Image (cartoon, rainbow, N blue to C red):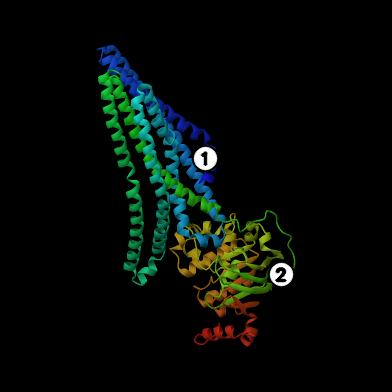
Amino acid sequence: MKKLLRFLKDYRRDSILSPLFKMLEALLELLVPLIMASIIDRGIGQGDTGYIVRMCLLLAALAVAGLACSVSAQFFAARASAGFAARVRHALFAHIQTLSYSDIDRMGTSAMITRMTSDVNQLQTGVNLTLRLLLRSPFIVFGSMIMAFTISVRSALIFAGAIPVLSVVIFAIMLWCIPRYKQAQEKLDGLLRRTRESLSGVRVIRAFCREDKMVEDFDSQNESLTRTQLHVGRVSVLLNPLTYVIVNLAILLLIHSGAIQVNAGTLSQGQVVALYNYMAQILVELIKLANLIINITKSVACGNRIEAVLETGGEMTSPQKMPRIGGDTAVAFHHVCLRYGRSGADSLTDIDFSVKPGQTVGIIGGTGCGKTSLVNLIPRFYDVSEGSVEVDGADVREYPLNALRRKIGVVPQNAVLFHGTIRENLRWGKKDATDDEIYDALQTAQAKSVALEKGGLDYVLEQDGANLSGGQKQRFTIARALVGKPEILILDDSASALDFATDAALRQALRALTPRPTVFVVSQRVSSIQHADLIVVLEDGVVAGMGTHESLLASCQVYAEIYASQTRGEGTQ
């Protein structure tokens, strides 16, 4: 949590002025009981109407000054807390963009969304309240006790006894609540994950008539979160009644002691009223302090969760200088092994082959055999556990990440498009691409006719391309990768929604590109990769065969079985 305070450095002045104005407001409040005592003892006691009017005007002036101080303090606290939250959110989002796939897999998307929204908002509230109340409330509490000693030492001892008891109660509840608030936030992560899955998968849910099951699961997680929050709430809510009980007992003792001293002539009625007002001020401030502590405990828990994200990563370093490149290979795998996180087994084992510039590589195998894992190593979405991956003769770990990924065009399995025009989406591949370059990419991706049917490049795509078919989305994502004219193009099962004729036209268009990129095609279809210069057959993360289509039919049983299963009923393409 302490490391997050660096985001307040640009708001030092606001962070200082806010509590200062609150302290000034508190100082003015401490003068009010003394003025009230003076009005009672001198103005009312001696029948001095002019004195009463003057003191009332003074009270009004103190009220106006206090209001001005309070508004000023709120202004500076709001500006500091809002700016602090904006910087934290910006840093958090920027850091998440640098995380490796492994880090994102480990934390989960829903947890990061919770930290970007709910946790940062709670942290902003905590900073605001801390700047305004953290110094003010203790100042009022101890200031009231000191002022009480100036009036009557005997009565002030009641203050001195009540304040430590209140402190013990407050801090005991606070220490108990902090870990429980953290548990509640973790359960909120789970609830958000369930909500996100339900909304993104609503078509699947309805297709299988699982609405009731999803509602039941949501209710279960929601009930669990509610129980945790209620459990914490039942304990934290004890703060107010316990402080009321302790302070009111102290007030009873104070009035009793004051009455005895008034009868003895050692204390005036106005001084008893002043002591009562000071005790009432302590009660109000301790209630504020109790609520502040509840918010601070929530904010600390949220701050620690945010800090944990900011401290995540660092395993994947990005050098600043370009490595020395050269050689006759575009991509080379040297005895590569890959293990995900804390998984006990390797997902890829001893992968060793090289690819020359301009060649097309087909990667095929059963579901879960490691095809996507293999191509994800080229743009360094994951780091190898053993061995090395080279691009243009240099280890990918020696490249600045941006420089490496600018050489590579990636079309992922899931065709992801963003809300905006076709032009805006395709310029992700090259931010200054002209319309002619975009149309050339669309032509190669067999998507130009789709764009023209939609009305051109200004046609607005919905979030995730909801107003496109599956095949149209895939063609637009392929075009997006082609706009930047990458040296290496990775098509990760990105033609699965295309018909055979369109798939064949796409492959022919890719072969006609000049300069011709090195292409990696991950596919379940033999027809999509059978004309590749090199075909890599994977089985359980191990290379089961490698070669051309004809050689693999003769030498690789796994490939032959896949080919036979796909051509038995539909013929070759």
Q: Residue at x 52, y 40 (%)?
A: 8
Q: Residue at x 43, y 32 (%)?
A: 73
Name the residue beneath numbered marker 1.
8
The tag earlier along the polypeptide, 2 or 1, is: 1
Is 479 in front, or is 313? 313
Helix, strand or loop at disc 1?
helix
Please indicate whether residue 101 sits to the left or right of residue 233 in the image: right
Name the residue beneath numbered marker 2.
329
Helix, strand or loop at disc 2?
loop
Q: Residues within 10 Å of mark 2 (few under 14, many from 20)?
A: some
Picture coordinates of residue 403, whole percent (x, y): 65, 57
Q: Residues within 10 Å of mark 1 (few under 14, many from 20)?
A: some
With respect to residue 363, does 21 lie above or below? above
Q: Is residue 515 visible?
A: no
Q: Quadrant of the C terminus?
A: bottom right
With respect to residue 53, does 246 lie above or below? below
Residue 276 found in image quarter: top left
Amino acid on which the number 2 mark rests in the picture: Thr
With respect to residue 401, does 84 lie above or below? above
